[in-house]
Amino acid sequence: MTAMARSAPEVQVKEAVLITPSDPTANHLLKLSAVDSQLFLRFTIEYLLIYRPLRFNGMDRDDITARVKAALGRALVPYYPLAGRVRVRPDGSCLEVVCRGQGAVFVEATADFTVSDFEKAPRYVTEWRRFLALEVADVLQGAPPLVVQLTWLSDGAAALGFGFSHCICDGIGSVEFLNLFAQLATGRRNGSSADFKPKPVWQRHLLDKTPFTLRQQPTQLLHPEFNRVTDHCKFMSRFTPDKLTPTSVTFDEWRLNELKHSINPTSQLRLLCTTFEVLSAYIWKSWATALDFPPQQNLKLLFSVDIRHRVKPSLPTGFYGNGIVLGCAQTTARNLTEKGLAYATELIKEAKNRVDNNYVKEVVESVSLNGASCVPDPVGVLVLSQWSRLGLEMVDFGMGRPVHLAPVCTDRYCILLPVDDHSRSVKVMLAVPSIAVDKYLDLLSDV
């Protein structure tokens, strides 16, 4: 532990308990899909939501804690796999969930933080780690797939940390669960199964290889996210946690418009590109420029693409499994840094447009046939995750809407976040090698 970590404000755990479903649930095994079972999804999605003080509608801490715990038990009835345990199937083909109502973990804690401590980036990568005290390193070792931590801050504000096993749900599915959970906590839903909208849908077989005709040739080469590249710069050695500085930059609506306007006005791309595409391109280009990679270094931007309506037939409403595949834009460091913003934006748009029904079939074939070898090569990679359109900013447990949203750990994965009361603004959080952080921030602010 560093001296900085030792001097950080204290977080004291008051209680840690298992919360089981409040009603009996099915006792069986549920198979996860080939997409769910990918090695690179065997980690925890970790959200941190910060709520202002004095918005608790007359309830005290004990009342709110009791409501949250009770609501968690009720929410785990329709979403009972989140109370199970994940393991590898005996035949090794994929993962499955052992559903025995084992429960999710609930933690209550106090902390010497205030709401203003979350207005900027944390001082180091793991400073906010303690707001989700139970860190699930490997869900396949019997860990619970869902952890909830309610932490009371010293100024009367509250922090809610959530950890979801990515094997069981993606961002869209996890937020659907959080909305139900929050509505049960506030009484906006009565807990009747008929009242759940969207109704949780399992149906993981829809993303297995079974419905597809497997190709005779391997498809891995068609998907650059799985292909290895030559490392010209000892890439991963730059990104150890002690060498990273977290950053947080907000792009207001006018700055996002300026980015689009910076693309050649005669270009059709300017009319067609989305905010996500142009902002992602700008971040990727600024990051690569600041880190000064060798010109020949191959660089990739990986990002999730929702496939719920890109496959045929579409996945059903309420499907909360991993309805995503990775989009991959790639180029050399020279091209990314020297060519204009339109170039990188076009690469990202093309990567998104490639994801169609056949593309998803190819991914399923690859992960089904190649298993452990289908893991994105981290060399030259920037991973970007868009949380700004999930609806996290609407999750109200009776304490108002969250005023700050963040990942529990701000690391080398770039997170796009919503901004309180500014629906068209986006906050960008990313940890950058400390030697390049000043240049990165200068580039990111130079619109």
Image: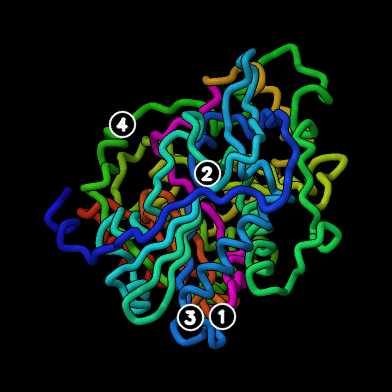
Q: Residue type at mark 1?
A: Gly
- Mark closer to the observer (2, 1): 1
Q: What residue is rendered at 24% in x and 64% in y? A: 10
Whole-percent x, y for residue 303 in the image = 56, 47
The rendered magenta stretch, by its main secondary structure, is classed as: loop
**From the viewer's perspective, is residue 1 above or below residue 341?**
above
The region drawn magenta spans 373-399
Q: Nearer the viewer, residue 125 or 144?
A: 144
Residue 340 visible from this viewpoint: no
Q: Nearer the viewer, residue 192 or 219?
A: 192
From mark 3 to mark 1, how far is it between C-alphas? 14 Å
Residue 396: in magenta span: yes
Q: Quadrant of residue 113?
A: bottom left
Residue picked out by circle 2:
302
Q: Could you say where residue 265 lies in the image, as x and y percent from the top left?
A: 61, 70
Upstream in the sequence, badge 3 or badge 2?
3
Is label 4 or label 1 in front?
1
**Is mark 2 in CB contact (under 8 Å) with mark 1?**
no
Q: In this rendering, does residue 52 appear at all? A: yes
**Where does the image place residue 205, in percent across and percent down from the top left?**
78, 31
Query: Mark 4: which amino acid?
Result: His
Q: Say if 428 sits above or below 200 in the image.
A: below
Question: Furthest residue to the left?
Answer: 3
Q: Are marks 3 and 1 in contact (CB under 8 Å)?
A: no
Local crowd size for mark 4, using a 10 Å CA cut-off: few (<14), some (14–19), many (≥20): some
